[in-house]
Image (spheres, rainbow, N blue to C red):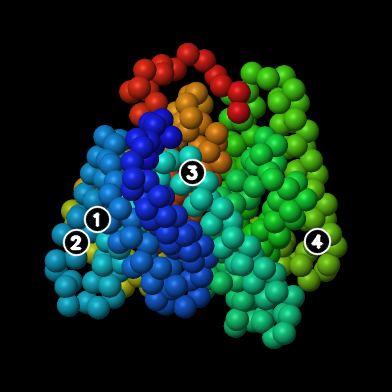
Amino acid sequence: MSELAQPSPGENCGLVFSYQRLVDAAVFIFVACGAIAVIEPSPYDFASLIAMPLWFLGGFSINRSFLVFGFLILAFNIMGFLALIPFWDSPDSSLYQYQSAYLVLTALFYALFMGNRTTHRVELCLNAYVAGSLVAAIAGILGYLNVAGLGEGVFLHAGRASGTFKDPNVLGSFLVLPIVYLAHSLMLGRAKSILLTGAALLVIFLGMFLSFSRGSYGATFVAFSLMVVSVYATSENRKMKRRIVLAAAGAVAMIAVVIAVLLSMPETREFFNQRTAATQDYDEGSTGRFGNQLRSIPMLLDRFMGFGPLRFRLVFDLEPHNSYVGAFANNGWIGGFLFFLLVGVTVFVGLRLMFTPSPAQRLSQAVVPATIGLFLQGFQIDIDHWRFVFFMLGAVWGLEALRQRWVDQGRPVRGPLSP
């Protein structure tokens, strides 16, 4: 039930309350399991078979904002199935598209789930996400230190922490949201324990840093900066503004110290310098990452339905490493434009949530920056099958449902709110 509506009394309130607690517990486990992707099918996939039906049977309401999101993401997915038609007999292409449909289903679920009782449920999901992130980050740190033989081949990949993911890049990007969320909580003084929250933030940041993912570094910087700017700009309280500045400066100083300590180790410093170079060997040349993307454009202009799902690799021997090029390659012209439209509308809605006063503003200032950071990362890596990207999409649109209810109930926007 929306926090903007009052519950009606009744003899079944206790039963409803108990059922909602059961749904919350199932969803908490579902979200937390998103941190485990090193095995397929993931525990996340099994947890979805419990959490989503439980929620569905409890009933839900649909806000009109969901219709926009639902249309865009479903239309994009349908175009993928149309592009698949000539390749139904290809196991890889078919599996890829069915997985896409499943991920879209999870995004719709999250949008509807967090679109009701929004503040409670978004915080529930973010706390579950943080719990999973701690597991993933600790696994990555243990792998990097090769504790108990958990290094290369277990939680380490080519010298980079991968934790509970198969790819270090995915681990690093997965940890962007909890870094921003925990820093946001500390900045606004909403952390129940400054010490524990600070320790969790340090562990998760270490996990992200040891992934040595350039894209994750950039996404974290963009997300953290955008979060700080939005919180500062929307606060009218001078004391709060000072707190924000001091907390941001303290966070930057802590990060600088941690990085300095890590880079004092010769092997870490050498690997860091290698990974943060502007380009890598596989980026350069006509057959490198960027060369393939450029060569694919004229070919895609001649193919209205693209190459078909997961068939870019058959043409160029590599994935596109660009989700926007990949959208056109996998889903055709219409699918590519729909993907751009979905991202653009989500960014617009997210920025409005961050800078427009409403009950959704505070949580949006943690969720939206991380989402935008990953959208930008999509220009240099394939994010279209990352489970947590669909979680973030659902969270943004769930928060938009809360904002629209607030406006509909006669609470017009008049000026900035203090966090």
User: Neighbour class for label 2 at 10 Å: few (<14), some, many (≥20)?
Assistant: many
Is there a contact, CB below 8 Å, between mark 4 and mark 2? no
Total marks placed = 4
Q: Residue at x 14, y 66 (%)?
A: 85
Q: Which mark is residue 120?
A: 3
Q: Nearer the viewer, residue 84 or 237?
A: 237
Q: Which mark is residue 263?
A: 4
Distance in Å between CA atoms under marks 4 and 2:
47 Å
State the image coordinates of residue 270 (x, y, percent, origin top left): 76, 66
Q: Quadrant of the N terminus?
A: top left
Q: Circle 2 is placed at which residue position?
A: 81
- Mark earlier in primary sequence (1, 4): 1
User: Neighbour class for label 1 at 10 Å: few (<14), some, many (≥20)?
Assistant: many
Q: What's the residue type where badge 2 is placed?
A: Phe
Q: Residue at x 23, y 72 (%)?
A: 94
Distance in Å between CA atoms under marks 1 and 4:
44 Å
User: Neighbour class for label 3 at 10 Å: few (<14), some, many (≥20)?
Assistant: few
State the image coordinates of residue 267 (x, y, percent, origin top left): 78, 71
Distance in Å between CA atoms under marks 3 and 4:
40 Å
Q: What's the residue type where badge 1 is placed?
A: Asn
Q: Circle 1 is placed at which residue position?
A: 77
Is there a contact, CB below 8 Å, between mark 1 and mark 2? yes
Q: Quadrant of the C terminus?
A: top right
Distance in Å between CA atoms under marks 2 and 3:
36 Å
- Mark earlier in primary sequence (3, 1): 1
Distance in Å between CA atoms under marks 1 and 2:
7 Å
Is there a contact, CB below 8 Å, between mark 3 and mark 4? no
Q: Is residue 147 above or below residue 167?
A: below
Q: Is residue 116 above or below residue 265?
A: above
